[in-house]
């Protein structure tokens, strides 16, 4: 696979600096990578970062819980589809190294998307304790306790 690290960084930084979401693309990527790490999900960190930038490019603002939930649901809906390189300077890339690994990752992703949505729903209902419990599940019991 060909790569263009400077072009990729420029793409993520460009989205990250958009009005309304200042810093949101990188924050979302960090949250996704933390989820991946704490749950040992076999998804490429590079793919999570590039998809986070792609997702945030279409957003007008950034809210951590809301957008993490939407992002995970979106990844689940598109079934971790292969991604054309948005910079046009390198080849297409994949979320997982094999179809077997992708099956495992999709199962983890579906569970995560459900938990994230439940956390957002609980937060919107002002049930903060329940929202935090779902976030704790989402992050493999590594979510900071208040």
Image (cartoon, helix red, strand yellow):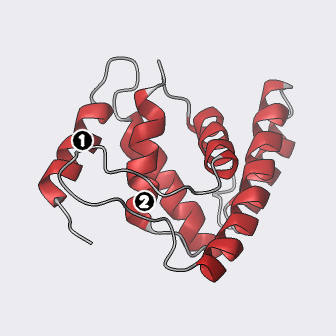
Picture residue at 49% right of the left edge, 61% below the top: 33
Picture residue at 31% right of the left edge, 34% below the top: 16
Foreground of the two, 79 or 110: 79
Q: How many marks?
A: 2
The residue indicated by pointer 1 is: 11
Q: Earlier in the sequence, mark 1 or mark 2?
A: 1
User: Around disc 2, counting alpha carbons within 10 Å, would you say few (fewer than 14), some (14 to 19), or many (20 or more)?
Assistant: some
How many angstroms separate mark 1 from mark 2 (CA)? 13 Å
| 133 w.r.t. 98: above or below | above
Picture residue at 63% right of the left edge, 42% below the top: 74
Image side of residue 10 versus residue 36, left or right: left
Image side of residue 128 versus residue 1, left or right: right
The residue indicated by pointer 2 is: 47
Q: Position of residue 112 (x, y in %)?
A: 73, 57
User: Can residue 127 be seen at all in this image of the molecule?
Assistant: yes
Q: Which mark is residue 39?
A: none
Q: Secondary structure at mark 1?
A: helix
User: Can residue 40 be seen at all in this image of the molecule?
Assistant: no
| 43 w.r.t. 21: above or below | below
Q: Position of residue 18 (x, y in %)?
A: 31, 23
* Res 2 quadrant in image: bottom left
User: Around disc 1, counting alpha carbons within 10 Å, would you say few (fewer than 14), some (14 to 19), or many (20 or more)?
Assistant: some
Image side of residue 98 versus residue 118, left or right: left
Q: Secondary structure at mark 2?
A: helix
Q: Position of residue 19 (x, y in %)?
A: 33, 17
| 62 w.r.t. 3: above or below | above
Image side of residue 94 versus residue 87, left or right: right
Foreground of the two, 50 or 131: 50
């Amino acid at each position: 696979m060909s790569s263009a690290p400077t072009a990729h960084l420029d793409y993520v930084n460009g989205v990250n600096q958009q009005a309304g979401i200042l810093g949101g693309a990188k924050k979302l990527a960090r949250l996704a990578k933390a989820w991946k790490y704490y749950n040992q999900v076999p998804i490429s960190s590079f793919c999570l970062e590039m998809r986070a930038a792609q997702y945030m490019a279409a957003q007008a603002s950034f809210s951590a819980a809301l957008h993490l939930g939407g992002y995970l649901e979106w990844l689940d809906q598109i079934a971790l589809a292969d991604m054309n390189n948005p910079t046009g300077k390198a080849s297409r890339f994949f979320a997982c190294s094999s179809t077997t690994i992708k099956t495992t990752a999709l199962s983890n992703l579906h569970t995560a998307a459900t938990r994230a949505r439940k956390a957002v729903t609980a937060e919107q209902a002002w049930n903060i304790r329940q929202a935090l419990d779902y976030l704790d599940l989402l992050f493999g019991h590594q979510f900071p306790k208040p």
